[in-house]
Image (cartoon, rainbow, N blue to C red):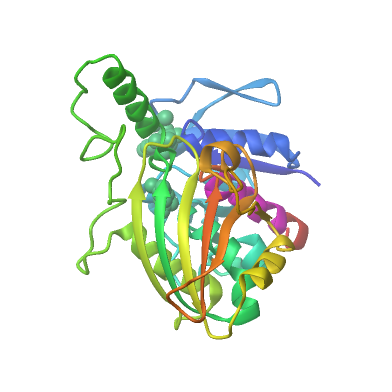
Amino acid sequence: KEFDVAVVGATGAVGETMLRILEQRKFPVRNLYPLASERSAGKEILFRNRKIRIENLAEFDFSKVQIGLFSAGGSISEVHAPRAAEAGCVVIDNTSQFRREPDIPLVVPEVNAHALAGYTTRGIIANPNCSTIQMIVALKPLHDAAYIQRINVATYQAVSGSGASAIQELANQTAKLLNGQDIDPPKAYPKQIAFNALPHIDVFLDNGYTKEEMKMVWETRKILEDDNIQVNPTAARVPVFFGHSEAVHIETRDKLTAEQARKILSKAPGVKVIDQRKDGGYATAVTDGANNDAVFVSRIREDISHERGLDLWVVADNVRKGAALNSIQIAERLISDYL
Ligand code: A2P
Ligand code: 11C
């Protein structure tokens, strides 16, 4: 069986990766419709060695497709995802627009594929935020084994999470500074990102946390279906192009040794443990995460400050597992189990 698929935001950092992953995983695409703004309409993209014209999202008739992969921003999904669903297209939405709505499933296939069943109510499935996805893939097996009560996490996030313009900004700033020139006024971020670290992702909220941080709280609880889990995040942007890193500290109800955790994680779906206690015996964003599909877990150790605490270093490609790949894994489940 084959499916007609629309990729909304096909010219963006995530959209382009979706096209490549559809090819790589041989997703059964009959007709592909790359969609973007009217600025891009008429240009061409390559899919399976064929040139396909980009169409204007605003004018697209979604009754022509069965699956829509959306990654053009929350305000675009707000308008066009319900319009697509109404036309009979199942939307897999990579924006934060619908994630917190109770009747819209928020899915990481390795963790809560069962929640997909709820897609029929609204015809929309939400893809979680990249920093939540990699954390939850690593933590779910430990949660099942010992019940996680509290998570303290600090992220080190790549600029590709902010899209193509931020990738360009880091490249430009880096080149200028290395050539002894002044940088242009920053646009993608409020301060210089090259050779720097910014403790700020997404907008500030009333409680002093940023929205990126609160997404990790809200989404973790929804995916694990447990509002009692305490999550305390700090999200930072670092001058890395691809791959988010996270220092994750958990407190479990039952004692879990580092050895037990390593054993559990080495068998966990979607996880790859790289954890030798020696120089270079750990995963990094650039050398391991980027361009790979797995969530890498390193530095597994018992917290010397807490009896039932465990520390982990978690790395993944934010554009692949954090966004495009997870969306396509959802689509694969959808077609195998429901369509
Ligand atoms: P376009 O290239 O036509 O602007 P990124 O996250 O990498 O910045 O990419 C954003 C994606 O969302 C791009 O594909 C972009 O298309 C698309 N997009 C932005 N605004 C709109 C819009 N008004 N309608 C449709 N697609 C849009
Ligand atoms: C980042 N996590 O790295 C963001 C990008 O809610 O889908 C994705 C934002 C989202 O900047």
Q: Position of residue 123 (x, y in %)?
A: 56, 61
Residue 112 shown left or right of residue 227 in the figure: right
Q: Position of residue 150 (x, y in %)?
A: 44, 77
Q: Which residue is farthest front?
A: 278
Q: Nearer the viewer, residue 187 or 236?
A: 236
Specify whether residue 314 is painted magenta. no
For the point 54% across and 33% down, the residue is: 16
Examine the residues drawn in magenta and state their main secondary structure: helix
Q: Which residue is farthest right?
A: 1
Span of residues in magenta:
321-334
Residue 7 shown left or right of residue 159 in the figure: right
Q: Position of residue 56 (x, y in %)?
A: 45, 32
For the point 36% across and 31% down, the residue is: 165
Q: In the rendered image of this protein, does residue 166 appear above or below residue 111?
A: above
Q: Nearer the viewer, residue 87 or 217?
A: 217
Number of callouts in the render? 0
Q: In the rendered image of this protein, does residue 222 appear above or below residue 153?
A: below
Q: Quadrant of residue 90?
A: bottom right
Specify whether residue 325 is painted magenta. yes
Q: Nearer the viewer, residue 199 or 223?
A: 199
For the point 26% across and 63% down, the residue is: 209
Q: Is residue 310 visible?
A: yes
